[in-house]
């Protein structure tokens, strides 16, 4: 067995875990979640489902524009993406259920939850985008926009987060409640592309893990 391959897949699973934990912190901070999670929160209020389940559903739907933009239908990549979406949703619901008692009340604690959650989330996305094993459709959408439409990651991030932001607003209008949407959502919309680029430079992944087959 190739130990570096095992390390790569272990790091990949861990990056999804980190991503889910970052989103959990953002939800608990309650000053604005990422647009995709905000859209999931809005959907959960309409259909009375768990947030993680709604995240899985949105992951399924977003593959439609991915196929349209890339003009590719890769069944194995599709299956891998749905696997990532499933375990991400389960991780997220796990944190929300286990730490349901966590409710930061003071504005300082809310801001800390947001800052830490946003940095953790961006770091997780940075790592598993570079591992390039399989991404959940949300982040596959970012990569597809970046690869096929907008080469600059910062600008591609505007599209990646702008689409669910509109969806979240629509669900919020229907619910007459913009839960999950706040100043933090706007901050993420404009700055998370820069955070991901920062972690691409700050968090290095050894070549023997990125391309383990060369070292068999």
Image (cartoon, rainbow, N blue to C red):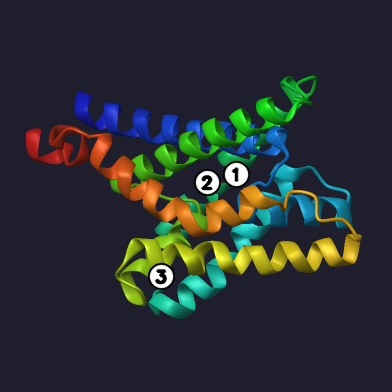
- Camera-side residue: 152 or 8? 152
Q: Mark 2 points at which residue?
A: 83
Contact (CB < 8 A) between labels 2 and 3?
Answer: no
* x, y percent for residue 181: 72, 53
Rendered view: 145 above or below 176: below
Rendered view: 114 above or below 175: above
Which circle, 1 or 3, is nearer the viewer? 3
Rendered view: 110 above or below 127: above
* x, y percent for residue 12: 38, 36
- Which quadrant holds the C terminus? top left
The CA distance from mark 2 to mark 3 is: 21 Å
User: Can the viewer see residue 65?
Assistant: yes
Q: Residue 145 carries which label?
A: 3
Contact (CB < 8 A) between labels 1 and 2?
Answer: yes
The CA distance from mark 1 to mark 3 is: 22 Å
- Disc 3 element: helix
* Residue with the most extreme left position: 215
Q: Which residue is drawn at 43% across and 38% down?
A: 124
Locate residue 130 relative to residue 185 in the image: left or right: left
Quarter of the rendering containing residue 208: top left
Q: Which residue is drawn at 65% across and 59% down?
A: 58
Sequence-first disc among 2 and 3:
2
- Disc 2 element: helix
* x, y percent for residue 53: 72, 46
* x, y percent for residue 212: 17, 36
Q: Mark 1 points at which residue?
A: 86
């Amino acid at each position: 067995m190739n130990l570096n391959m095992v390390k790569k897949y272990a790091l990949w699973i861990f990056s999804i875990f980190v991503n889910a934990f970052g989103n959990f912190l953002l939800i608990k901070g309650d000053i604005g979640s990422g647009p995709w999670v905000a859209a999931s929160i809005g959907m959960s209020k309409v259909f009375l489902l768990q947030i993680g389940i709604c995240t899985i559903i949105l992951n399924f739907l977003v593959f439609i524009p991915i196929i349209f933009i890339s003009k590719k239908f890769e069944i194995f990549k599709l299956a891998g993406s749905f696997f990532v979406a499933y375990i991400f949703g389960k991780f997220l619901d796990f944190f929300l259920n286990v730490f349901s008692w966590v409710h930061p009340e003071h504005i300082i604690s809310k801001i800390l939850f947001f800052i830490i959650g946003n940095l953790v989330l961006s770091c997780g996305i940075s790592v598993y985008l570079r591992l390039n094993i399989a991404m959940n459709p949300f982040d596959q959408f970012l990569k597809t926009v970046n690869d096929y439409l907008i080469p600059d990651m910062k600008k591609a991030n505007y599209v990646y987060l702008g689409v669910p932001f509109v969806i979240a607003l629509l669900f919020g209008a229907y619910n007459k409640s913009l839960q999950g949407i706040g100043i933090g959502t706007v901050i993420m919309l404009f700055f998370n592309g820069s955070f991901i680029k920062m972690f691409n430079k700050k968090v290095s992944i050894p070549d023997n893990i990125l391309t383990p087959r060369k070292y068999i």
